[in-house]
């Protein structure tokens, strides 16, 4: 996730608005295009030069940026560590107040940096993002130190929930992507913990993670609905959608594994409440979104449904040395479903121009197939044969996915035009 | 620019409120509660002082009563359905207070603890103490080991409890 909530080009009072930063690849493309325009007679020589002159090469990750970001993170963590290491010598109230001071200090520092960035443009986005992330993290330190100062057990989902809500509030207040990522991840973690607290079952937790994923994808899609969206909101939708996709893939992974941990009830109330919320959010996303949005929300819902189905399709025994026909069938269905859904996400990543999503889906596909193969299929295939088969399946999937992706992108373009 | 500063200020206030909500139970007990003293001992005797957190148990609070002998499935389900919010009335016994049997409705008089026994284990929010690792707490640690320690607990009118401190001897 690149932290560019207030990206350079959008800043109105940039000191030199005539010269905007662009990456070398962008400039290369632009130069070619402008040359073509000139040849085609669309622009004359001075105009072409003027267009090219508006941009200046900016290297995406410079050494200075890396050092600055690392520096911000080190200073922040060092500060928290310094306080934590000397906690024993302070009274509980002092400890809490000190954490509040560190947290508010980081919030104020981030604001000062943001203001400076707006005025002079000298503060790189990653530094601002890092300080904001630290501020959101320090809020967690405040919550946990508060509990500790009051002699309450810090073990429990309530504190994580408060931290998650706080991080989200802060993210939306400063329009910061980094705190948003933290807030979404913490919210999903909180929900999984609440469900685990209500029912200690791997299946319930897997379903909870899928529910969190569907809600996140739906919220992300709703951020980008053109009717009420701004470019800023679209930017904010991306972390929701991408973390949601990752959650869905992880949940399906867990649900498809051929294990059974015994307890398999109707599911706790919080899970049903979450399912209801997921249905409502997904339905809203399906109604309000465009075609790609519908594919995205639909994919998450299908993954949730398949996950729930596989969770319910548990077979007696679970002995991997002695598989029955039913277990074989389940394993094949699970692999096929995972291949389809993960490929769907890879395609979606292509349509959204999100390399992260494509890579995550591809990695999930590879890991899942390998694990399934080792866990279930190694009984009939061993060594080289196993890897050959997995390779052929992946190649086949790749060819199919590529064909499908091209078709989908083509149709998407046709629908958009 | 002014607008964002206001937004950030509001966010900070909301976050502080969130801390208050998350910690409401012990805060309310601490600020408006009545002080009671309860005998306390170590809950976990395996390396109990490994870190600064200590798990505590209270010998004078009711043990969770697992039904004895053979229990029918219906009986089990009935008990399971009953579990949840548990109230423990407190009565004075010399220097310390002791808990009576678990009831399901708040007692009408005297201090009581509002606990939860969903997991067949009574949790009243006072089961963890933070003892800093310095030698000044050696006496408390010895008392916890030998079972002579006393916990100071504040209990508000709704039964919310907060552990204020643990001391040696009664």
Image (cartoon, rainbow, N blue to C red):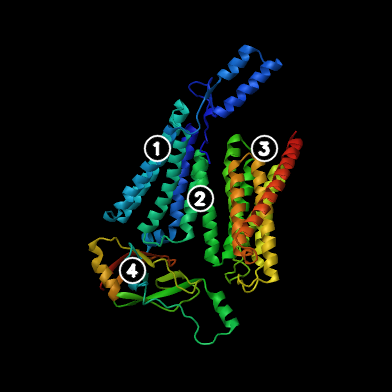
Q: Label 3, on which residue? A: A226
* Nearer mark to the viewer, of 1 and 4: 4
Identify the chain of the residue marked 2, using the numbered disc in the image: A
The answer to whether A395 appears left or right of A124 in the picture is right
Percent x, y of residue A272: 63, 62
Q: CA distance from mark 3 to mark 1?
A: 34 Å
- Host chain of mark 4: B
Identify the residue under disc 1. Answer: A109
Circle 1 residues within 10 Å: few <14, some 14–19, many ≥20: some
> What residue sits 51% from the left and 87% below the top?
B69
Visible residue check, residue A263: yes
Q: CA distance from mark 1 to mark 4?
A: 41 Å
Q: Chain letter for mark 1, please.
A: A
Image spot of residue B12 (x, y percent): 44, 44
Task: Please name the residue that numbered disc 2 is placed on.
Answer: A165
Is residue B87 toward the left or the right of residue A369 in the image?
A: left
Q: Which residue is mark 4?
A: B48
Q: CA distance from mark 4 to mark 2?
A: 34 Å
Mark 2 residue crowding within 10 angstroms, few (<14) / some (14–19) / many (20+): some
Gap between marks 3 and 2, in whole Å? 26 Å
Q: Identify the image quadrant of residue A277.
A: bottom right
For the residues marked 4 and 3, what is the alpha-carbon distance in whole angstroms?
A: 58 Å
Please give the name of the residue rendered at 45% of the width and 72% of the height, measured from the top-left corner.
Answer: B122
Residue A167 on image: x %, y %: 48, 47
């Amino acid at each position: 996730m690149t932290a560019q909530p207030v990206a350079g080009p959008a800043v109105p009072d940039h000191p030199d608005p005539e010269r905007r930063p662009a990456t070398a690849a962008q400039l290369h493309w632009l130069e070619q295009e402008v040359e073509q325009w000139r040849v085609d007679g669309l622009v004359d020589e001075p105009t072409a030069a003027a267009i090219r002159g508006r941009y200046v090469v900016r290297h995406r990750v410079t050494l200075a940026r890396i050092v600055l970001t690392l520096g911000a993170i080190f200073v922040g963590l060092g500060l928290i560590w310094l306080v934590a290491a000397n906690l024993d010598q302070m009274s509980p109230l002092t400890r809490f107040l000190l954490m509040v001071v560190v947290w508010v200090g980081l919030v104020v520092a981030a604001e000062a940096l943001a203001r400076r960035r707006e005025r002079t443009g000298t503060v790189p986005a990653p530094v601002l993002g890092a300080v904001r992330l630290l501020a959101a993290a320090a809020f967690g330190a405040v919550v946990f130190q508060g509990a500790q100062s009051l002699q309450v057990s810090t073990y429990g989902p309530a504190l994580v929930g408060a931290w998650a809500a706080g991080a989200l509030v802060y993210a939306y207040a400063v329009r910061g992507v980094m705190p948003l990522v933290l807030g979404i991840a913490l919210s999903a973690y909180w929900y999984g913990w609440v469900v685990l607290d209500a029912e200690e079952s791997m299946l319930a937790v897997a379903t909870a993670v899928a529910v969190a994923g569907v809600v996140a994808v739906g919220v992300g899609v709703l951020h980008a609905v053109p009717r009420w969206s701004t470019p800023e909101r679209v930017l904010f939708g991306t972390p929701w959608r991408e973390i949601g996709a990752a959650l869905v893939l992880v949940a399906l992974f867990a649900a498809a594994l051929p294990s059974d941990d015994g307890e398999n009830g109707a599911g706790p109330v919080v899970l049903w409440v979450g399912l209801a919320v997921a249905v409502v959010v997904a339905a809203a996303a399906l109604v309000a979104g465009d075609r790609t949005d519908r594919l995205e929300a639909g994919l998450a819902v299908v993954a949730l449904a398949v996950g729930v189905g596989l969770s319910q399709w548990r077979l007696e025994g679970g002995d991997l040395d002695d598989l029955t026909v039913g277990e074989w069938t389940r394993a094949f269905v699970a692999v096929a479903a995972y291949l389809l859904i993960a490929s769907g996400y890879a395609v979606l990543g292509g349509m959204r121009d999100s390399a992260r999503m494509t890579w995550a889906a591809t990695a999930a596909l590879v890991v899942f197939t390998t694990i399934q193969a080792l866990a279930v299929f190694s009984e009939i295939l061993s060594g080289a044969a196993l890897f050959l088969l997995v390779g052929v399946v992946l190649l086949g999937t790749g060819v199919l996915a590529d064909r499908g992706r091209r078709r989908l992108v083509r149709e998407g373009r046709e629908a958009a035009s | 620019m002014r607008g964002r500063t206001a937004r950030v200020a509001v966010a900070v206030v909301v976050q502080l409120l969130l801390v208050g909500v998350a910690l409401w139970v012990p805060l309310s007990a601490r600020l408006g509660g009545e002080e009671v003293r309860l005998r306390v001992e170590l809950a976990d005797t395996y390396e109990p002082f490994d870190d600064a957190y200590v798990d505590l148990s209270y010998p004078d609070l009711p043990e969770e009563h697992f039904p004895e002998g053979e229990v029918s499935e219906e009986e089990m389900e009935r008990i399971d359905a009953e579990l949840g919010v548990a109230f423990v009335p407190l009565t004075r016994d010399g220097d310390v207070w002791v808990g009576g049997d678990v009831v399901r409705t708040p007692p009408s008089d005297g201090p009581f603890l509002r606990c939860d026994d969903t997991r067949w284990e009574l949790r009243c929010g006072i089961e963890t103490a933070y003892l800093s690792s310095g030698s000044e707490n050696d006496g408390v640690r010895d008392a916890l080991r030998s079972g002579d320690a006393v916990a100071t607990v504040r209990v508000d009118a709704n039964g919310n409890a907060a552990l204020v401190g643990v001391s040696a001897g009664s």
